[in-house]
Amino acid sequence: MAAQKITLNVDGMSCGHCSGMVRKTLEGIDGISKVVVDLNGKKASFEVAGQDLIARAIQEINEAGYKASEN
């Protein structure tokens, strides 16, 4: 299966540390790659190897203290 590009809305990021935490959280999930976090746009984009990883990404971002949702 080809990787799918996903963009999530991420509320609660207010500084470079916040965007770095979101990036690090996503990069720590096996099957997620090419992570780009846009602090000003409050979005995180990445590629996933499987649909099930989208829900996991949202859950892990939320557990890190931010509010992630699909567009």
Image: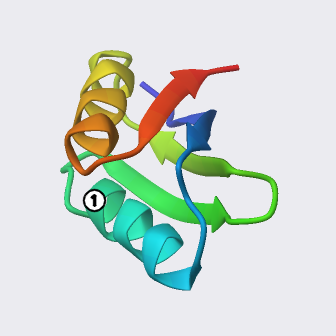
The residue sitting at the right extreme is 41
Quadrant of the rendered structure where residue 27 is?
bottom left
Circle count: 1
Q: Nearer the viewer, residue 37 or 11?
A: 11
Q: Quadrant of the N terminus?
A: top left
Above or below, 4 relative to 28? above
Q: Residue 26: give x, y in percent of width and height.
A: 34, 55
Q: Amino acid at mark 1?
A: Thr
Q: Residue at x 48, y 32 (%)?
A: 68
> Is the residue 42 above or below the residue 9 in the image?
below
When asked about the image quadrant of residue 7, the answer is top right
Which quarter of the rendered picture does the C terminus lie within? top right
Residue 37 picture quarter:
bottom right
Q: Residues within 10 Å of mark 1 (few under 14, many from 20)?
A: some
**Residue under label 1:** 25
Q: Residue at x 55, y 59 (%)?
A: 13
Q: Is residue 60 visible?
A: yes
Q: Is residue 23 above or below residue 42?
A: below
Q: Position of residue 8 (x, y in %)?
A: 60, 34
Residue at x-position 57% and y-position 42%:
10
Residue 6 seen in render: no
Give the x, y percent position of residue 48: 43, 37
How is the model colour-coded? rainbow
SS at badge 1: helix
Q: Is residue 24 left or right of residue 67?
A: left
Residues 35 and 3: in front is: 35
Extreme residue in the bottom direction: 16
Q: Residue at x 58, y 77 (%)?
A: 15
In percent of width and height, residue 43 lies at 67, 48
